Image (tube, rainbow, N blue to C red):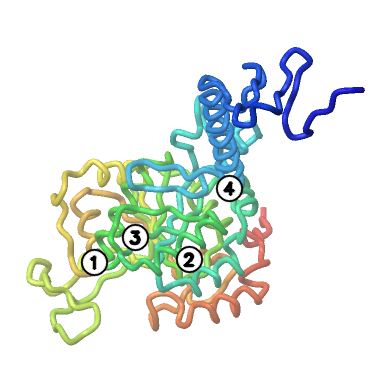
Amino acid sequence: MPRTSSPLIPTSDNQPYSKSEKTKKPFIPSSHSSRPPIPFIVFSIVCLLVGISGTIFSLLTFTRSQSPPIFRCGRVQDSFRGHYLLTAQNHRSSKISDGGNALDRPKFLGFVGILTGFDSFDRREGLRSTWFPSDPEGLLRLEHSTGLAFRFVIGRSKDAKKMAALNQEVDKYKDFLRIDVDEDHASPPHKTLAFFIAAFELFEADYYVKAGDDIYLRPDRLATLLAKERTETRTYIGCMKKGPVITDPKMKWYESQGHLIGNEYFLHAYAPLYILSAEVVSSLASAKNNSLRIFSNEDVTIGSWMLAMNVHHEDNRAMCDPRCTPTSIGVWDIPKCSGLCNPPARLKELHDTNMCSKSPTLPAEEDDDR
């Protein structure tokens, strides 16, 4: 009669189970031991940890690959720089760079910083729906066609909600240059100086342009202006003005240090749009801390520096046109507003006119009578 065994207890022909020894545990060979050896346990744990680590690394790599990296230089961040990494092999590097690594400090005809604030989202959206490209690819095409780089320029805030909203906007559009300035406390002149220093450190340009987020700009005509032959290397371009110094604290544009200026301002450019040549910005970037006097108003402050630096003042009224014309470069509601009055609405209104958005870059040349 064949021998039977319990299906739950292993048996062997050489190692029978004795029913008479009810308290005796069955003998199980070491190869079938129910307790794995310690080395095997250790090896299994190591494998598990390696697997978990690999999974986490893969997820992080996948997440990072969804958006281009942000280029940082100290506390300055260029959110668009990742697109240079993605397009380093295309024709752009050979057209704009002088050779070598164009990513270190890419070269442009001009760098345009549009200074903006945390409460100006509607202005930025107004620009993105008109003359300013609304996607990274469009911004890159504009760089290729004009030789100009464009960024919104903004600092930081201690308000967590404002920073969270800005981070979302940066992730979506990638068109910001974030500078080392506390927006809650820095004055406009301090922010403007920080912009020029950051722009000079990150970009090599023949000219650096400061623009407000409340003007209508023609990038093609701006590029034509900057490409003009000039004999002066230290140049200050803008709509120049002079006027009485405001010393009444109750009035707009009050100048707290007016006694240092006198009765009338020196020649200086309107703040919404002006240009400094590379040599001028280089001098500003190399200035020692607190060595430059800061006045209450940005345009006066910049103008005082230009006066001391012995630059060439180039007055160009096309940069402050109150309406779109065949030659206008920057359009804003001068002198009623320092920029456009009600920018989001006015930007759209201007863009819908052919003279603003569709007129030729240069006016038609008159026939030669010879």
User: Which element type, helix, strand or loop, lies under badge 3?
Assistant: strand
Residue occupying image coordinates x 14% and y 83% = 249
Disc 1 from disc 2: Cα separation: 33 Å
Residue occupying image coordinates x 42% and y 39% = 204
Disc 1 marks a residue whose amino acid type is His
- Upstream in sequence: badge 1 or badge 4: 4
Disc 2 from disc 4: Cα separation: 39 Å
Percent x, y for residue 316?
42, 62
| Quarter of the view holding residue 172 | bottom right
Disc 3 from disc 4: Cα separation: 22 Å
Instruction: Report the residue marked by disc 4.
Output: 67
Dot 1 crowding, Cα within 10 Å, few <14, some 14–19, many 20+: few
Per the rendering, the mark at residue 185 is 1
Disc 3 from disc 1: Cα separation: 10 Å
Instruction: Report the residue marked by disc 2.
Output: 318
Cβ atoms at labels 3 and 4 below 8 Å apart: no
- Upstream in sequence: badge 3 or badge 4: 4
Q: Is residue 153 above or below residue 262?
A: above
Dot 2 crowding, Cα within 10 Å, few <14, some 14–19, many 20+: many
Disc 2 from disc 3: Cα separation: 33 Å
- Upstream in sequence: badge 2 or badge 3: 3
Disc 1 from disc 4: Cα separation: 32 Å
Residue sitting nearer the eye, 289 or 354: 289
Q: Is residue 11 left or right of residue 103?
A: right
